[in-house]
Amino acid sequence: MKKFGVANAFGLYDMHGNVWEWCADHWHDNYKEAPSDSKAWLFDDDNNTRLLRGGSWNSYPSFCRCAERDWFSPNFRDHNIGFRVVCSAA
């Protein structure tokens, strides 16, 4: 396994490629008209496909990056899809 030896701002190493990460955003083909206020980009339809980011442990290395995107139905489950818990100090 390739290791980069550089920690992120939280002191964690090699975070990309653990699991595909569910995002709150619905799938869009591109970023045209995306919100500029960091809010989730949603449609009115809750059953819309959801965005996944980052690749997983069984992806090709070129897919293990934060810009890599995919999508699935919100009720799809697999062993290489998860989520990241984020909190703010504010």
Image (tube, rainbow, N blue to C red):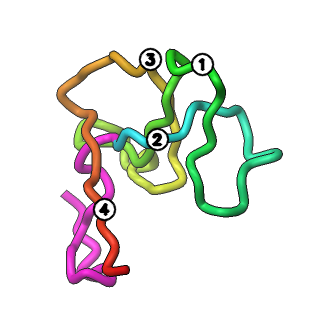
Give the residue type at disc 2. Ala
Mark 4, residue position? 86
Mark 3, residue position? 73
> At which x and y percent is residue 50?
49, 29
Give the residue type at disc 3. Ser
Q: Do the residues labelled 3 and 1 touch (CB within 8 Å)?
A: no
* Lower sequence index among marks 2 and 3: 2
Q: Nearer the viewer, residue 53 or 39?
A: 39
The reply, left or right, for residue 37 in relation to residue 26 is right
Would you place residue 21 above or below residue 39 in this image?
A: above
* Lower sequence index among marks 4 and 3: 3
Would you place residue 54 above or below residue 45 in this image?
A: below
Image quadrant assignment for residue 38: bottom right
Query: Element under label 4?
Result: loop
> At which x and y percent is residue 13?
22, 73
Q: How far separated are the C-alphas under marks 2 and 3?
A: 12 Å
